[in-house]
Image (cartoon, rainbow, N blue to C red):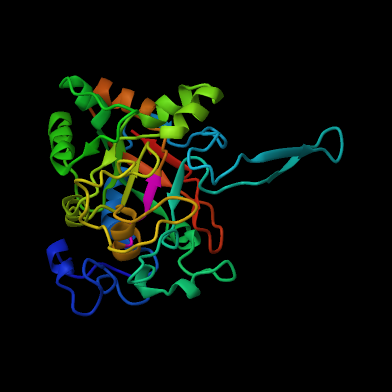
Amino acid sequence: MSLPERVPSYDELLANTDAPPGASWKVFGDGDRVGTLNFLTPDRVARAATLARAGKVFSLDYPVNAFEPYPSGTRHPMVHHTFANNVFHRDDYVDSLYLQGTSQLDALRHIGHPYHGFYQGARTEDVTGENEVLGIHHLANHGIVGRGVLLDVERFMAGRGTPLSPYRNDRITVGILEATAKQQGVRVQPGDIVLVRTGWAGHYTALTEAERAEYNKVRRCAGLAQEEATVRWLWDHQVAVIAADNLGVEASPRNREVDRDFELPNQEVPAKGVDHNGMLHRPLIPLLGMPMGELWALDALAADCAADRVYEFLLVCKPLTVLGGAGSPPNATAIK
């Protein structure tokens, strides 16, 4: 697919007559399977390649099992087995590899909307383990290469005396994102892969196993405010991928007194897993087709950006080509 001559604004998407309000389904064409990755045009990718100037490389993936016990309680540690066919040979395999159990990229089949289904209107019954509809392989085969921009909100907020806390669900509003970008001297441009640092993953991985188990009883994390203004900002900036170093990109749990723009009435709370009612996952993944990255390793990159004041870089992300996968480790690398 390719970009239309003019990309409609989010307000225009809200006025859709040929798709659900706020959906991008007609923007990239009926057969589209990669959503906002269409913003990664050849020209934008080529310009992004020029940002690799100093040859500094940063892995943005935490190790597998880095977040055990996993805060949601629904993903379990991978078991790694090794064997040797002879004394000079080594081989291995894994059991219980949860593809979203550590640093991850969500596929467009990860979340559906209760009223409108999955991206491009795929029905719940059409997205099953027996098929490959909207799987992570579509994103992997397309390739994710572009200009990465780090918005180090944790450092910005600490610097102005209002630090984020891993024990609160602090809301990161559009105003905070823009103030962070201004202080850093960087602008978000069409096709960017935007990384938001909250400091949460660094805090969690520094805890002992016992401390993590206790923390998970009342877990909190700062993240994007779950309001329409956030979604409008991401779409109107033509962000290709939004990723963060927290549990879900959004502030968690949702502030039910304030963040109600996407709350649907009379929704049954699921007996297991996350209650996505009112969360950004629903407008971003199934309606806009925007991949979301969670638990990315941003601390080392952030320290370097703070040192040299360069917050843009070439970013390469290669999820596993798992046919029909709901997500994958991102295998993400920033090159400055």
Q: Nearer the viewer, residue 303 or 259?
A: 259
Q: Main secondary structure of the magenta part?
A: loop
Q: Is residue 54 above or below residue 285?
A: above
Q: Is residue 136 visible?
A: yes
The count of marks equals: 0
Name the residue rendered at 27%, 59% in the picture.
39
Residue at 20% x, 50% y: name it. Answer: 230
- Judge whether residue 308 is colored magenta: no
Q: Residue at x 18, y 74 (%)?
A: 16
Q: Position of residue 73 (x, y in %)?
A: 53, 42
Q: Could one spot residue 41 in this view of the protein?
A: no
x and y percentages locating residue 156 in the rendered image: 20, 26
Q: In which quadrant will I find the N terminus? A: bottom left
Instruction: Give residue 55's position: percent from left, percent from top.
Output: 38, 31
Residue 84 in picture, x, y percent from top left? 82, 38
Q: Residue at x 23, y 24 (%)?
A: 163
Q: Which residues are magenta?
A: 289-293
Q: Is residue 135 left or right of residue 50?
A: right
Tell which of 144 and 63 is nearer to you. 63
User: From what the image shows, is residue 265 above or below residue 296?
Assistant: below
Query: Residue 115 falls in which quadrant of the image?
Result: bottom left
Choose top left, top right, bottom left or bottom right for residue 308: top left
Q: Furthest residue to the bottom?
A: 18
Side of 160 where 84 appears, left or right: right
Q: Tell whether 172 sits left or right of 92.
A: left
Q: Could you tell whether 80 is left or right of 150 in the image?
A: right
Q: Quadrant of the C terminus?
A: top left
Pick the front one: 55 or 161: 161
